[in-house]
Image: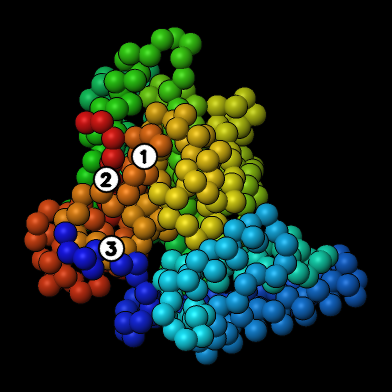
Amino acid sequence: MIVSAFFVFTLSLMMSFAYLTIKDRIPQILTKAIDTLHRHKNEMFEKHGEKGIEAEKKAISLLSKLRNESQTDKPIVPLVEKFADTDIWNQYLEHQQGLLNDSDGKPRWFYSPWLFVECYMYRRIHEAVIQSPPIDDFDVFKESKEQNFFESQESIMTLCIHLRELMQIIEHLDENQLKDEFFKLLQISLWGNKCDLSLSGGESSSQKTNVINSLEDLKPFILVNDMEHLWSLLSNHKKTREKASIVRVDIVLDNSGFELVTDLILADFLLSSKLATEIHFYGKMIPWFVSDTTIHDFNWLIEQVKYSDHKWVSECGANWENYVKTGRWVYHDHIFWTLPHEFCAMSQVAPDLYAELQKAHLILFKGDLNYRKLTGDRKWEFTVPFYQALNGFHPAPLCSIRTLKAEIQVGLQPGQGEQLTASEPNWLTTGKYGVFQFDGPL
């Protein structure tokens, strides 16, 4: 493997996707956050009086300062407000400073690793809010996430109806039919990952077409397809487990809204088909990358589905709520998911989280940000094996389910990446292509 494979992406290539993200998309996201705060000014006054108005002004001022810093390539400064992760973040910033050869030794927005800069921006948004009590629990992305859900209503209804129809016959399906349904719901979860608000700068990215009818047409765009390995793993556990034993699947979530619905439908199927006995979900502790799932988003969505006017959609929500109440679905959050560290550092930085993941029989990592952290966000050669890019991270058998929205991909066949580059120069970043990439016993 060539040496360049080990270098983390930086923003110094002036027309790279990473640079354009920092130059264009981050100011757009910050502007939208500022606008959201401004539009909720009256609500904050009604709830908190003059203190609410002052807090709103302070948060806007801090976000405006952040936008200016990012646009003018200012030095990246330490966090100041005490939070659970403040010291870890500032230690990481010192580490980044130690890697520089510049005379002033300060990381800057346009010349720092892309993953670090993006994560830092979202963490600074959170800092601006928590520095502004009594509105310190305000989610500047809440409106966008809820809009994505409401604008995807027809597609959500179609999926819920499909699931309820499937539940009526699931006991009568033979092994091949069950496998086909498993593959179908995996693909729905994959293509649900297209709905990423951080990629669109917070603008609408709802799902308005019937994804079930599109699955055959979309199959050629799956570049790595390890679904057979997932079926083999789970079906073997199902056949060999004792009655009282547990088969646990963990899902590290990405976007809320439509994508979260596709993940919950897959999770429901895993329980109903007895391919798993319990599902553990992992979300973010703070608002993140515009549309990433928090515990509020998780509970809110289940409640919205439960109170749907459509009987079968409502039944899905009621079942999901019951899974949570009975402990068959468990939601976890952990501050590690919003740190800038790649996942191979988890066992040192967050050993408690790593130990929890080790309890799983299979971990599904949804989305692009998780893929970047799994692979260290490095410019690997396309043919580098997935397990090698994981750099020793292997708490349990795992699979990345991801549509491509960043300039990184491993595990391709020789010539595959080059052929795609020749025919579609932007294939790595449009979300058009997807992967099911597995690492575990075959």
Residues packed near mark 3 inside 10 Å, few (<14), some (14 to 19) or many (20 plus): some
At 49% from the left edge and 39% from the top edge, which residue is drawn? 354
> Which residue is under mark 3?
6
At 65% from the left edge and 66% from the top edge, which residue is drawn? 126
Between marks 3 and 1, how big is the CA–CA gap? 19 Å
Q: Secondary structure at mark 2?
A: helix
The way the protein has been coloured in the rendering is rainbow
At 16% from the left edge and 59% from the top edge, which residue is drawn? 1
Q: Which mark is residue 394?
A: 1
Q: Nearer the viewer, mark 2 or mark 3?
A: 3
In the image, 404 versus 442, the foreground residue is 442
Contact between marks 3 and 1 (CB within 8 A): the answer is no
Q: Amino acid at mark 1?
A: His
Q: Which mark is residue 196?
A: none
> Which residue is under mark 2?
387
Between marks 2 and 3, how big is the CA–CA gap? 15 Å
Residue 210 seen:
no
Which percent across, then down, holds residue 97? 50, 73
Q: Quadrant of residue 363 in the image?
A: top left
Mark sitting earlier along the chain (2/3):
3
Residues packed near mark 1 inside 10 Å, few (<14), some (14 to 19) or many (20 plus): some
Mark sitting earlier along the chain (3/1):
3
At 81% from the left edge and 69% from the top edge, which residue is drawn? 44
Residues packed near mark 2 inside 10 Å, few (<14), some (14 to 19) or many (20 plus): some
Which percent across, then down, holds residue 36? 66, 74
In the image, 26 versus 39, the foreground residue is 26
Residue reaching furthest to the top? 243
Q: Secondary structure at mark 1?
A: loop
Residue reaching furthest to the right? 49
